[in-house]
Structures are given as C-alpha cells and as structure tokens.
Image (tube, helix red, strand yellow):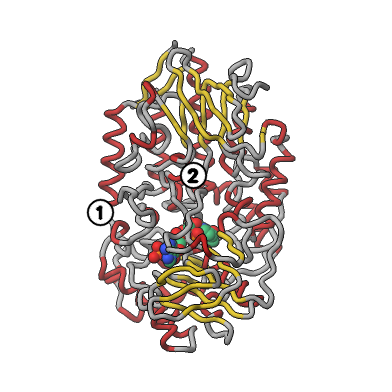
Amino acid sequence: MSRTTPSRRPLDTIVVGAGFAGLYMLHRLRGLGLEAQVLEAGTDIGGTWFWNRYPGARCDIESLEYSYSFDDALQQEWRWTERYASQPEILKYIHHVAERYDLRRSIRLSTRVVSAHYDAAANLWSVTTEHGDTLRARFCIMATGCLSNAKLPEIAGLADFEGQRYHTGLWPTAPVDFSGMRVGVIGTGSSGIQVIPVVAEQARELVVFQRTPGYSLPSRNEPLDPEDERATKQRYAQMRKQARESVAGVAGYPVPTQSAFAVDPAERDAIYETHWNAGRTSIGRVFDDLLVDAKANDTAADFVRAKIRAQVHDPRTAAALMPRDPIGTKRVCLDSGYYQAYNRPNVRLVDLRATPIEHVTPRGIRLRDGEEVALDALIFATGYDAMTGALNAIDIRGTEGIALKDEWAAGPRTLLGLMSAGFPNLFFITGPGSPSVLSNVIVCIEQHVDWIADCLAWMRERGNVRIEATRDAQDAWVAHVNEVAAATLFPVANSWYMGANVPGKARVFMPYVGGVGPYRKKCDAVAAAGYEGFAMASS
Ligand code: N01
C-alpha cells in the first residue's frame, strides 16, 4: 500500500483499538457482513490487559462476571481459575476469544492512529496511521478505552532520573525483577495498591509516595471452587440479565432501599461487617443515601477507616493512610495484602501532603524537608488522562474541519456517550456521557457494541449512509448527565472522573451516573423510536 495516498477502496468500517471493545465490535461487524479493519497501537491485542502487565495486576470484578456474555458456548466452556482473574489469565482469555472467532486476520498491530478526518463530500473517514498510510471507511468506531492514555506526574527533574522507570499502564512485556533494589512507587490508586504488596516482597527497600489515601477493601481472592463455578454457569443467563439491568453492571449487588439512618448504629455496623467480609466493593452501595448525603457516607467511611487502622501496626503510618474523601466518590479498591505491606520492615510510606516532593534527582527523590530518598527504580502508578485522553491524542476532525478536542475543550459533549454532533458516522464505545468506568465495563462494552451494530443494520435496511447526533439532543443529554452527577457526592472528590488529575483539563463529571440498567433503557428507547435525536441521511 502507498505510504501517502489513501488505500484503494473505502472500507465499511475502521475500528480503532483491539481490546475487549474492538474485538467484540469486529465480531459483530463480521456478522453483519461488513468489512472491518481494526488498527491497534500495541504489538499485540488486549488493550488495557496488554498494557497493564505490572506485578499484581488483577481485575476487581469477579471473573465469572468480567467476561463476554454474547456467546453462551464461550462462557460455558471457558474455565477461570480464580475468583478475581489475574492479568495473564485475562489476556489468555482475550487471545482465546480472538482465535475462537478468527479475529486476528482483520487486526493490524503496531499501528497507532494519529488522525481521523471526515470528508463530507465523499461521506468517508480518512484515518492516518503513525506509519503514514491512510485508510478510508464509511464508519469509524473508536474502541480506544477510557483508561489508556497513561499519565506521568508533573514533577520537576523527572527526566534526570538515571534509574529504571516504569508506568503501570505501559509495563514492558519482559518480566521485571526488583530483587535487591531500592524502589519508589508514586501513586496509590487501584494500580498502586496492587503493585505495592508484590514489589514489597521483591525489593530490598520500597518507598511509597502517597498524595491522597484511598479506600481499599480485602478482595479475599481465592481459587474458584468448581462447584460454585458449575452452579454459576447453570444460572448464567439470569445472572447476565441481572447485571445488564443493575446499577453497576454486576449481578447480585444489593439494590439499596433504605437510608443509613433507618437502622441503629450496631445493626448498621453489622451490615457493613458482612460486606467487608464478602470481598467485594458493595459496601458503598448498601444504603440509598451513601452517595448523596455526606453524613450517611461518613458512617461507611468511618467503618472502613477503622478497619484500615486495625491492619497497620505503626500509628503514624496508619494515620497517613486514612482516606478523607467520601467513600465511593473515587473508585474503591480491592487489594491483596496492601495495608499489611506497610508492616514489613523494608516498606516506608512518605505522606506527600506533609512532606511534598521537591524534585527528582539522578539518583532518587528529594523531599521538601531536604531528605534525598535514594532509588534504583521508580514506578509511576499515576493513572491516566481518562475518558477523553485517548480520543484527544488523535487529531479527529469532523464537518468543516472542526476538531473534537476544541469541541470538547470545556468538557466532553456527546449524545448518550455514543456520538458527538459535528462528527457524522463516528462512534465511541463507552464514551464520556455513558456509565462506562462506573460499572463492570464489559457489560457496557457489549451494550454499546450491540447498539452500534444494530444501528448500522437498521441504516442499511433503509438505505441510510450517514448518522449524526443533533445538537439539541446532545445538549439535553449533557445537561441530564450533569444534573444527575450534581445530585451526588461524586463531584466533591478530586478524581479522574472529574478530570482533576490533569492540569488544565475541564472539571466536568464525565461518566453517566444514572446506572447501567436505566441507561440501557434510554438507549433502547432511542433506537426503538427510529434513533431519535440522531439525524440520518441517505446520501
Ligand atoms: O490511577 P488513579 P490508577 N504526585 O488515577 C497519584 C482502573 N484500574 O492507575 O489521588 C503524587 O486512580 C494520585 O494521587 P491523587 C480503575 O478504574 C482498575 O491507579 O491524584 N501522586 C493517585 O493516588 C482505576 O480507578 C484495576 O492525589 C500523584 C494515583 O497517582 C483506574 O484504572 C487496576 C501524582 C493515580 O491513581 C485508574 O487507576 C488498576 C503526582 N504528581 C486500574 N499524580 C482493577 O481492576 C498522580 N498521583 C483492579
């Protein structure tokens, strides 16, 4: 293929990304008889589970739920070994799916997309890769992930560090051995909480640099009991339905029906204790006012804070680990020995609120109090430019050359998280304005992929070749997304949901907090009404 001229014949669809979303999208498109090309930046498929191969990486949704549901034979035949699957096992599952449905032949690896421009006259998207070649297609589907644009911290002197450095979200494919090393970890979100206990066992010394303590509950991960697995698989259809209709995309989570103050304190704590022992994050959803009333939230937060304190021997370290945000307004973590790691003699916590980092030096980190912490390796568990980062990293231009980045400068604007006005025939899978990161994301991925595939089939049947979100419908959806978020405690925390971790990023609550089930109903109603709010054209 020419490096500078567009490929010969336009494709039906281009899908950007070969993670869970891109793979299932490809499968559905094939089923419709549409020609699809998937472009993937990584050297292999897997998306998040390809890049996040740091020691300790594991899913915090149970494996029997964090998996595809679209094919009963697949879900019956695949055997998970643990309650919470590790990254290698999830990647193995993804590889199995790709082989089973013969997906690889439509995927081009090591191909980062740098731009996607809409040509209105031809009604085609021109997608250019890092290698300089351009492909054209009628539809462009972004399966780029919500947490795929890894972010380094803004700390002076970072480039001067002469030791080894790693970002949890860009982990090398070759195993890394920290034995005998002095290692620093910056960041204590889901990734930091997982990597810390594992590196603590290898490293000579481990220093954790914490800016904001979070809430973490014990995962109680264990080998999957074959009897439980068999029983679950027998009621898979019912369980998947429950997950699709639930708030968070997980079956069996309690649907809260009462206030935290409807029961007396002893009973309330007994309820929290049951959830603490369950090895799930359900504690934040036990009562219906936990995410809307600060006082109610405190009852759960205080319970977990006391549990954290009880696990950490050194009172000063325990005090520094006390989270202050309302519980649930940042993602609650599940860990395997996180707090116990601080009881090891080779692990030390630096509370950056008390002693900030002055700058990074060639040999370590200098703190504001003058101490230089000597380090052989630095691990950045500093998260992502979430939800919009991966999209904004691509030069996306819609009608009349408008840039998506500019349209979204004050926060992302979408209709249902699926499309954005001014960008015809461009779909987002789990885009901002949909529940995505607030849920078991596989449930949301399948819902979006099915909605998009059904929409393309509907258009084809009617001879439509162009679909675009209308501004009015989009404005109404954005207003609704903001309104439901504003009625909760979510905007209180400086979270990546709010864009607060990226300097200069608009402070807008990006995911839709209205729940997976209610959201699905809205999407289905829009489709049933002939894609209400979307403009269609046949030429
Ligand atoms: O990233 P994060 P993550 N100086 O943004 C700190 C999913 N996930 O990769 O809170 C010092 O949560 C930052 O501090 P602060 C899951 O959805 C799932 O851990 O900004 N510290 C924070 O502590 C999750 O929510 C799984 O003050 C700095 C940390 O870095 C999402 O991915 C596993 C700093 C970043 O935490 C992201 O998780 C892993 C600085 N300059 C991830 N900049 C599972 O399924 C940032 N930090 C289990």
Expressed as whole percent of the image width and height from the top left, the position of residue 281 reads 47, 65
Q: Residue furthest bottom?
A: 314
Q: Type of residue at label 2?
A: Cys
Q: Does the rendering let one see residue 273?
A: yes
| Location of residue 31 by image quarter | top right
Q: Label 1, on which residue?
A: 487
Q: How far apart are marks 2 and 1 (CA)?
A: 23 Å
Q: Are marks 2 and 1 in contact (CB under 8 Å)?
A: no
On residue 353, which mark appears? none
Q: Does the rendering let one see residue 285?
A: no
Mark 2 / mark 1, whichever is N-terminal:
2
Expressed as whole percent of the image width and height from the top left, the position of residue 416 reads 38, 37
Image point (61%, 65%), residue name: 164
Q: Indicate left or right for 205 with 155 as reference.
A: right
Q: Label 2, on which residue?
A: 444
Image point (58%, 39%), residue name: 17
The image shows residue 322, relative to residue 380, as above or below, that is: below
Expressed as whole percent of the image width and height from the top left, the position of residue 439 reads 46, 52
Q: Quadrant of the N terminus?
A: top right
Q: Indicate left or right for 434 with 449 as reference.
A: left
